[in-house]
Image (spheres, grey):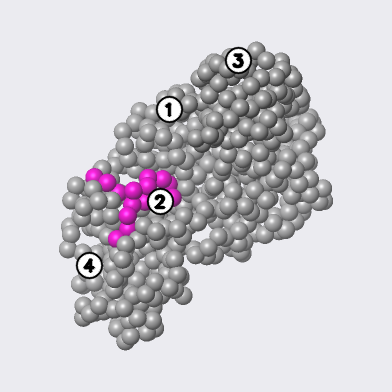
Amino acid sequence: MKIYNLLALLLLFSGIALGQKVHHEVSMPAPETHYFHVETTLTDFDEEQLVIVMPVWSPGSYLVREFPKNVNLVRAKDENGNALDVKKVSKNKWEINKGKAKKVTVNYEVYSFELTVRTSFLDKTHGYFNGTTIFTFPEGYLDLGGTLTIVPHSSFKTITAPLIEVADGVSTDNNAKTFQFDNFDHLADSPVEIGNQEVFSFQAAGIKHNVAMYGPGNYDVEKLKVDMAKIVESTTNVFGQNPNKEYWFIIHNTDSRGGGLEHMNSTTLNVNRWTYAPEDYNKFLSLVAHEYFHVWNVKRLRPANLVEYDYSQENYTDLLWVMEGFTSYYDELILRRAGFYTEQEYMNVFRNTINYVEGTPGNNVQPVAHSSYDAWIKSYRPNENSRNTNISYYSKGGLLAHAIDAMIIKKFKGKKSLDEFMQVLYSKFYEEENSGMTPAQFKATLEDFLGDNLDDFFKKYVYGTETIPYASYFKDLGLKIDQIRETRTSLGISVSYNDGKVMVNRVQSNSAAERAGLSPNDEIIAFNGFRVDEKSLLDFMGKLAVDDEFNLIIARGDQLMSIDAKMGTIEAPYYEFSYETNKLGTYWLRKK
């Protein structure tokens, strides 16, 4: 049997139609230029004008990043090599006047020099891309599958992709690999690493897990195999089953910490290359747990508005506090259950989260549901005033998960927890219906699970900004939480020392600094006539009492200004914990 006939049979039995066909080829002939070369072949489309669409955002990262900005001139030709007219009709769409052509070949280059989990990168050391950043799909054919051939540079020997490899029959390059994708969502959800990465595997939850490590670091492969397996097992136990047949971790060891991005059967993690040292190791494992929990919560159990993606614009939902917040709750709980945290260490993480949230002025301004909805315009675009007006749906949502877990544990006397509720959500809104859930459905399902009306809870703490009554939720579970309101002497600014300049980074709302007229980006030059650096400014400020008056010389741009100020105070609420290990509250602390 010829190779191309074998490929046709593979596509037929996989459910991909043998009518219209899509084939992408990605090559990188000169990695030092940072350009991926993309050739897309579209076969047997009847339309005389064919529109191709490139996403402007990546699912899981809620910001329009305008990926087409990195695309050079788009060209097209027919099966005879004749040039076809290509017209750009919007920021991310190109119309191809194909006429009666049966095969259209589209060529373009994508500049790729941003190494994050949601973008693409290429240099002489490796290549990495997310499908959303370089691929297009024919408008109206989002559900059409196809094949992808990757032609690596001759210096790159390894391709890591969470896709099924199929016979090629197309490329003449012996190092090329061809993969099958079921639809564009599948292709967009499959990150690819090309280079000379170290690859290893481990078994956990009955599933093979592959790890591709780019970049040097202080990691220990054998230790990672054991510890990552513990994370996988503990996460799988939350839901009682694992939907994957195989899973891929792509890990970039870099000079900074960059986070992670979830996919259906893979994730990409950007971490500091020295994060595997004992003092930082749990931060890495927490990131692993967070992204792996998304296998269920986000990638399968989704908000209804994110079941079908619109790649051309924002996709709004109120539920990121559940999607990311509950995941943030579990990423630390899983470390406790897997044995990486002691009880005290876990409780310290919980307490620190409360103190962070309740110490953020924006927590009293922005409801967590609004934080979810406005992720597109606020969370991913913070500015110098964000702390005064915004709250993180990650951390605040995690605290609400704590509270809901406490309600469930108390209601069912420790026989059920948030685990069982997550199983109900997963079963109902993914396995049975695959419809996703609306905010109203989430609330109704929780009320049904608990047998209680939760109008007050949602009004106050989800759609309002009232302080969660932590003490009352946890007192019957053996955890005593005391709120302490401390009044501190403070001007209400944060500063940094850059290039020999003391710069104001942030001014707190209703602070003495705000009343005096200080602004972010002001340079503080002198205090009471004496030149200051960061240390001497802090020393001067530390000797002031409430209502003491002083003078600052600042530079606002190129203009020198004299500002008279008076030392003020800020309210600094914080929480202290004490708990009894023999009470019901230890339920969520136990290894499970």
The amino acid on which the numbered mark 1 sits, given as a three-letter code, is Asp
The answer to whether 19 appears left or right of 504 in the picture is left
User: How many marks on residues?
Assistant: 4
Spot occupied by residue 123 in the image (x, y as percentages of width and height): 27, 46
For marks 4 and 3, give the CA distance: 72 Å
Disc 3 designates what residue? 540
**In the orientation shown, which residue stands out farthest toward the bottom?**
100
Label 1 or label 4, whichever lies nearer to me, is: 1
Residue drawn 63% across the image and 57% down it: 317
Residue drawn 59% across the image and 48% down it: 378
Residue drawn 25% across the image and 51% down it: 33
Disc 4 designates what residue? 170
- Mark 3 is surrounded, within 10 Å at the Cα level, by few (under 14), some (14 to 19) or many (20 or more) other residues, namely few
Instruction: Name which quarter of the figure residue 373 lies in.
Output: bottom right
The amino acid on which the numbered mark 3 sits, given as a three-letter code, is Phe
- Mark 2 is surrounded, within 10 Å at the Cα level, by few (under 14), some (14 to 19) or many (20 or more) other residues, namely many
Spot occupied by residue 307 in the image (x, y as percentages of width and height): 56, 62
Q: Is residue 145 above or below residue 376?
A: below
Q: Is residue 213 above or below residue 471?
A: below
Label 2 or label 1, whichever lies nearer to me, is: 1
Spot occupied by residue 42 in the image (x, y as percentages of width and height): 33, 74
Disc 1 designates what residue? 499
For marks 1 and 4, give the CA distance: 55 Å
Which numbered disc, 2 or 1, marks the residue that appears first in the sequence? 2
Disc 2 designates what residue? 119
The answer to whether 402 appears left or right of 69 in the picture is right
The amino acid on which the numbered mark 2 sits, given as a three-letter code, is Thr
Q: Pointer 1 and pointer 3: residues touching (CB < 8 Å)?
A: no
Label 2 or label 4, whichever lies nearer to me, is: 2
Q: Which residues are magenta?
A: 109-124
For marks 2 and 4, give the CA distance: 28 Å
